[in-house]
Amino acid sequence: MRNSERVVFVTGGAGYVGSALIPKLLEQGFRIKVLDLYMFGDDALSSVADHGNLFQIKGDIRDQALLRQHLPGCTDLIHLACISNDPCFEMDPTLSKSINYDAFRPLVTISKECGISRFIYASTSSVYGVSEAENVTEEHPLLPITDYNKYKGLCEPILFEMDSPEFTTVAIRPATVCGYAPRQRLDLTVNILTNHAINTGKIKVFGGEQMRPNIHIQDMVDLYLLLLNLPAGKIAGKVFNAGFENFRVKDLAAMVKSVIEQRFPGTNLEIETVPSEDIRSYRICSEKIRRELGFLPKRSIEDAVNDLIDAFQSGKLPDSMNDARYFNIKKMQENQRQTAGAPR
């Protein structure tokens, strides 16, 4: 089937990864339906908002009637929508569980009933929790230390039990994503470090010894495009780690410092280390995805830092230290306050 004949339904398509993915899907000729709450603003897809092959739906993935209305006629589904990261999940655990976990089985069931032929699920590599293993493969036990990690992992077997010749399922466990996107997040490790370095002249490191796997956002985009086009037999019922480089947080800080000092000769950035309650520390091995799918990331941490510097310099990220839209937890707290203060 040609791309122009396929309709890809993307949940959470106005989020960080989605805002980079949707324009590329349109470039490749796919028709797209985006379902999103647009919690972080309506402009994430402004560059393609008028594209004839993009249909945006402001709605909730828990709304089963809405799903049954819009899923028929779609051929593929990429599930990105979730309450993302531990602090956001813990802010309202009942709400978060209802979106990240309770809504998942109905979404998969309705997708299958409505004729979706390929379901791609964005899980997370943080399902491994804390691990000292040198190579954390897909067979490593899932040892989540937070409810966010736990429920992301619990969705995987639900998806795979519905796999069939007519309904191809695959789950990706991405590393921490970094780099620039139209709906920017500045609450992810490399992005945090770069934002502080550029805008305060100091890099603040929380902890530092924790290991973090990373992947450039454009490599994630390339991966989703690949998963849409690979033969079903290569991916059906499988889970893949997706990362590039495993580094300690303090090593990431040193990389950010190096890139910025090279870009701006004469700069001498200070690295400040402060205690952290975030004990998550893990490496992931992405050999399986390279071996079985031929996927190898093309971009580095340094590329992500340079992309962010370019975005800061071109004015794409104004008020980046304070504006709540760049920080998931701040924006959710702001929305909660506004909702609480709204007239009833």
Image (cartoon, rainbow, N blue to C red):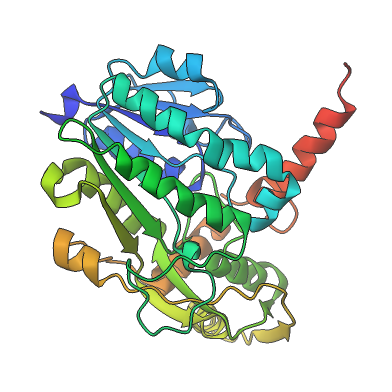
In the image, residue 130 above or below residue 221: below
For the view shown, which residue lies furthest in the front direction? 161
Question: Where does the C terminus fall, quadrant-wise?
Answer: top right
Residue 80 place in picture, x, y as percent: 45, 42
Q: Is residue 140 left or right of residue 132?
A: left
State whether residue 314 appears in this view.
no
* Residue 164, image quadrant: top left
Give the residue at x 67% y 70%: 196
Residue situated in front as seen by the camera: 155 or 87: 155
Give the residue at x 57% y 36%: 99
In the image, residue 140 above or below residue 72: below
Give the residue at x 33% y 66%: 138
Residue situated in front as seen by the camera: 272 or 120: 120
Residue 224 place in picture, x, y as percent: 29, 47
State whether residue 124 appears in this view.
yes
Q: Is residue 265 left or right of residue 160?
A: right
In the image, residue 162 above or below residue 344: below
Question: Where does the N terminus fall, quadrant-wise?
Answer: top left
Give the residue at x 47% y 68%: 128
Q: Is residue 81 left or right of residue 324?
A: left
Residue 181 place in picture, x, y as percent: 47, 50
Residue 166 place in picture, x, y as percent: 17, 30
In the image, residue 272 above or below residue 317: below
How many numbered circles does the render carry? 0
Q: Is residue 52 left or right of residue 11?
A: left
